Image (tube, rainbow, N blue to C red):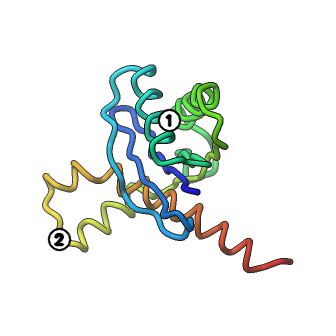
C-alpha cells in the first residue's frame, strides 16, 4: 500500500509518495496546473500507477486556526477529487510546510533556481511525512 501526498497550490500541485510500508515520504513530481480536468487526470494516473490506497491533501489553515480563501479552494479541489477517486482522501493541516521546505532546501545548499523547481514537491513530502508520523504514533500508543 502507498499513500500519495499533495501540496495544492494555485499554480502547481506538489506530489509526494510513501514507501510501500508507509513509513517514509519522498518528493515525487510537480503538476503544473492547467485545468481542473487535466489536474485530476494527472493525479488519477499517479494513483493508479502507484496503486495508492490513500491521498493526503494539505489544507492551508491560517495560523489562528481559521480557513481563508486558499483553504476553501483546497476543500473544493478535495471535493472534486473525491468524485473521481475510490481511494480514501484525507485533508491535513499544512501550516508552515512551505516555510519548512524552504528551510530544508536552504540547509541543503540548493540554489534559488532549483528551489523554485522542487519546493512544492518537498512541501508535499513534509505534509505526507507529518501524516505518516501521526499514524505511527497512534499505532504505538494503544491508549
**At 50% across and 41% down in the image, what residue appears?**
47
**Is 39 placed above or below 117 here?**
above
**Is 10 placed above or below 97 here?**
above
**Whole-number angstrom distance, CA of label 1 to CA of label 2:** 30 Å
The spot of residue 127 in percent (x, y) is 50, 57
Q: Secondary structure at mark 1?
A: helix
**At 64% across and 46% down in the image, what residue appears?**
90
Q: Is residue 134 left or right of residue 110?
A: right
- Nearest to viewer (mark 1 / mark 2): 2
- Determine which residue is flagged by label 2: 109
Instruction: Classify the position of the N terminus by image quarter.
Output: bottom right
Q: Secondary structure at mark 2?
A: loop
The spot of residue 71 in percent (x, y) is 56, 37
- Determine which residue is flagged by label 1: 70
**Is 39 placed above or below 37 here?**
below
**At 39% across and 64% down in the image, what residue appears?**
100
> For residue 137, what is the image quadrant?
bottom right
Asked if residue 112 shows in the view, the reply is: yes
The spot of residue 49 in percent (x, y) is 45, 43
Viewer-closest of 5 and 120: 5
Q: Residues within 10 Å of mark 2 (few under 14, many from 20)?
A: few
Instruction: Classify the position of the C terminus by image quarter.
Output: bottom right
**Is 6 placed above or below 97 here?**
above
Viewer-closest of 133 and 58: 133
> For residue 141, what is the image quadrant?
bottom right
Mark number displayed over residue 96: none
Asked if residue 61 shows in the view, the reply is: no
Amino acid at each position: 500500500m502507498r499513500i500519495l501526498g499533495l501540496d495544492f497550490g494555485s499554480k502547481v500541485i506538489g506530489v509526494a509518495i510513501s514507501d510501500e510500508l508507509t513509513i517514509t515520504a519522498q518528493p515525487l513530481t510537480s503538476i503544473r496546473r492547467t485545468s481542473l480536468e487535466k489536474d485530476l487526470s494527472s493525479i488519477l494516473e499517479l494513483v493508479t500507477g502507484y496503486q495508492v490506497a490513500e491521498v493526503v491533501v494539505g489544507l492551508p489553515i491560517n495560523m489562528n486556526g481559521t480557513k481563508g480563501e486558499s483553504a476553501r479552494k483546497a476543500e473544493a479541489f478535495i471535493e472534486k477529487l473525491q468524485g473521481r477517486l475510490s481511494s480514501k482522501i484525507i485533508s491535513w493541516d499544512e501550516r508552515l510546510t512551505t516555510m519548512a521546505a524552504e528551510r530544508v532546501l536552504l540547509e541543503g545548499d540548493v540554489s534559488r533556481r532549483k528551489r523554485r523547481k522542487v519546493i512544492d514537491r518537498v512541501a508535499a513530502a513534509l505534509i505526507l511525512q507529518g501524516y505518516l508520523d501521526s499514524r505511527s504514533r497512534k499505532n504505538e500508543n494503544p491508549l
